[in-house]
Structure formats: structure tokens, C-alpha cells
Image: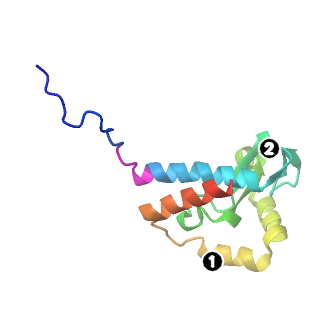
Amino acid sequence: MNPQPKDKDKPIPKPERSLAQLKKDLDKVFNKFIRHRDSCNGMFKCISCGEVKPVSQMHAGHYYSAGHHSALRWVEQNCNGQCVKCNTFLHGNLLGYKKGMLEKYGKAFVERLEQCKNNKSKMMRFEVLFLIDHYKKLI
């Protein structure tokens, strides 16, 4: 005879997602937000080369890489629509990216971003959950 659980109709709770899993979720929704923000009628202008291309060729490219600059990983101005060619094959096309950043945000902002590039960020679970919810609402 198999013992029946007393609360057999009670749903089994899902295991809590780890902070690393939540950060991956945030990356996905943040990148989707950037693609949405930087596109218009299925087209976008690459921040690095200035070419207008279809959204299917758009990456959410970071000026300061997300892997090495944790404090800037989810800073909206550090991430912009960038074509596959510039982001992947030209390794970010950083000279063109900086020119595009200066045009889009101005010299003062780019200098402030540079001052923050080596800051470290240890986000807590509630902060990541808040940002996931925030970007889902913006899309």
C-alpha cells in the first residue's frame, strides 16, 4: 500500500531560481527591450557603422562588455542596437561605437560612463527581480 499525501491536491512548489538563472532572465528581457527601443518599422540604425538594417540583423551590443564591466551590464545607454557585423565580426567596432555614443549621448555622458567602467556590482536577488519586472513592462 502506497501512503497518500494528506494534501494531494496541493500543488508542488517550483524550486526557487538561482541568482545566476535570474541574471540570465534579466539579460534576455533587457536585450529584448534594447532591440525594441532602438528599432522602428522593422529597421534600426547601427550605433557603430550608422547603416540602417533590418531588425533581424540587430544585436544588443554593449560599449563596455557585460562580462568585464558588471556595473554597466544593465545600463541602458551602455547597450545599443548594433549590427551583427560590427558586434561579432568587428569585435564591437569600438571606434565606431564611441563615435555613435558621442553623437547619441554627448561627450559628458560618455566620460561619466568611462569613469564607472571599473566599478563592481553585486546585485541582490530583489534588485534583479525588480529589473526583470521593469523591463517586461517597458516592452
Instruction: Say which residue label 2 marks.
Output: 55
Measure how far apart labels 2 and 1 are at the Cα level.
32 Å
Q: Quick check: 53 left or right of 114?
A: right
Magenta range: 15-20
Is residue 31 visible from the viewing direction of this image?
Answer: yes
> Extreme left residue here?
1
Q: Is residue 19 magenta?
A: yes
Instruction: Say which residue label 1 marks.
Output: 115
Q: In which quarter of the image is residue 80?
A: bottom right
Circle 2 or circle 1, nearest the eye? 2
Q: Residue at x 36, y 48 (%)?
A: 16
Q: How many labels does the image show?
A: 2
Disc 2 is placed on an element classified as helix
Q: How crowded is mark 2: few (under 14 residues within 10 Å), some or many (20 or more)?
A: many
Above or below for 58 versus 113: above
Give x and y (percent) for residue 19. 42, 54
Q: Quick check: 120 left or right of 13?
A: right
Rendering colour mode = rainbow
Above or below for 78 versus 108: above
Q: Does the magenta stretch include residue 118?
A: no
Give x and y (percent) for residue 10. 30, 38
Is residue 84 visible from the viewing direction of this image?
Answer: no
Q: Which residue is drawn at 75% across and 56% down?
A: 37
